[in-house]
Image (tube, coloured by chain):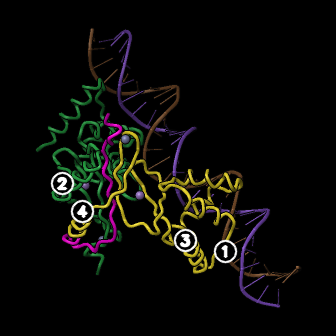
Chain colours: A green, B yellow, C purple, D brown
DNA sequence: GTTATTATGATAACGGTTATCAATATCATA
DNA sequence: TATGATATTGATAACCGTTATCATAATAAC
């Protein structure tokens, strides 16, 4: 099992910033890792609360920020503007297809599109950093 | 001059929904059309307020919604989550390159990327509707 | 254990947006 | 032009996700 690696990354990050361990942080990390991706902060809060009822919203947000800083987590914002968090460690970059009827989504990566995106931004004199691409449509199940 | 066309579209939309004209709506439409694109609601509010000091926020938001409904305006949300509004009528679809240092942006459209995007989403069984693509990087001026 | 420092949870504050509502403007009709 | 049904307005409260504040508690180096 690979939990060890992610815990190590988190611990190293805490150490590097002279931060301390806490039960809450451990529980939030585990809940995050053991759950389907693309959680909102509120969804994670409810999950953690089951095991650690005293936890507060602020700690969830603070810990998610730490997880993002150390590369375990990636924050996404789709059209509704609500932040969602997905696993990053061990997952390569990908974009999302999203069904406008049911919200179902698919993770995709098209190397040719990625290549053309980089070419496009360079052609305009930019040094490329990252991109966001979401393709919206109606999924197979909803088309029926 | 082409203001006439856009006014006609707006008036037709009001008529179709049994809505009424108002001085405020006329002023907001004109301020929107006569200004650089990608305005926030607050920026438009300040511009309109110069000619119509009594105008309120709510009327700006309500009118922007109408402009979007009738195809004169398109709402955009970049990473900061703040809604921005750009001219839609007479402008073809485009995506944005955005400088992460100064916020400068470039409007772009790459037909090959567009084609591959459609192919990609269809390959996953979706009926394609729209997409969002933003490429972030550091612009020529900021790289210095 | 002592002590300096960080973490926590409750909750207020924030910022953009939307809802509420009493007062006003619009416009089809007479 | 006057009427009256209906839509519009602006002030402002509410909303919602997120962040800041702060007194108290937990952590960990010594
Ligand atoms: Mn994903
Ligand atoms: Mn644009
Ligand atoms: Zn669907
Ligand atoms: Zn720049």
Q: Are marks 3 and 4 in contact (CB under 8 Å)?
A: no
Helix or strand or loop: what does disc 3 sit on? helix
Q: Are marks 2 and 4 in contact (CB under 8 Å)?
A: no
Residue at point 20% right, 67% down?
Answer: B120
CA–CA distance between discs 2 and 4? 10 Å
Q: Magenta span has A55?
A: no
Helix or strand or loop: what does disc 2 sit on? helix
> Could you tell me which chain the residue with mark 4 belongs to?
B
**Which dot marks residue A115?**
2
Does B130 appear above or below A76? below
Image: magenta residue range: B122-144
Foreground tag (1 vs 3): 3
Mark 3 highlights which residue? Answer: B6
On whether ligand 1 comes within 8 Å of the CB at mark 2, the answer is: no
Mark 4 highlights which residue? Answer: B113
Q: Magenta span has B124?
A: yes
CA–CA distance between discs 1 and 4? 43 Å
Foreground tag (3 vs 4): 3
Decide if residue A80 is in sight here.
Answer: no
Q: How many marks?
A: 4
Identify the mark nearer the N-term, 3 or 4.
3
CA–CA distance between discs 1 and 3? 17 Å
CA–CA distance between discs 3 and 2? 39 Å
**Which dot marks residue B20?**
1
Residue at point 40% right, 46% down?
Answer: B104
């Amino acid at each position: 099992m690979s939990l060890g690696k992610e815990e190590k990354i988190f611990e190293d990050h805490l150490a590097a910033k002279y931060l301390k361990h806490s039960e809450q942080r451990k529980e939030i990390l585990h809940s995050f890792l053991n759950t389907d991706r693309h959680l909102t902060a509120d969804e994670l809060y409810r999950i953690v609360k089951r095991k650690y009822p005293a936890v507060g919203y602020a700690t969830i947000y603070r810990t998610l920020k730490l997880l993002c800083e150390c590369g375990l987590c990636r924050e996404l914002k789709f059209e509704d503007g609500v932040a969602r968090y997905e696993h990053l460690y061990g997952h390569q970059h990908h974009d999302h297809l999203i069904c406008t009827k049911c919200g179902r989504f698919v993770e995709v990566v098209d190397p040719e599109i990625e290549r053309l995106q980089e070419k496009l931004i360079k052609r305009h004199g930019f040094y490329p950093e990252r991109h966001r691409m979401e393709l919206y449509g109606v999924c197979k199940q909803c088309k029926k």
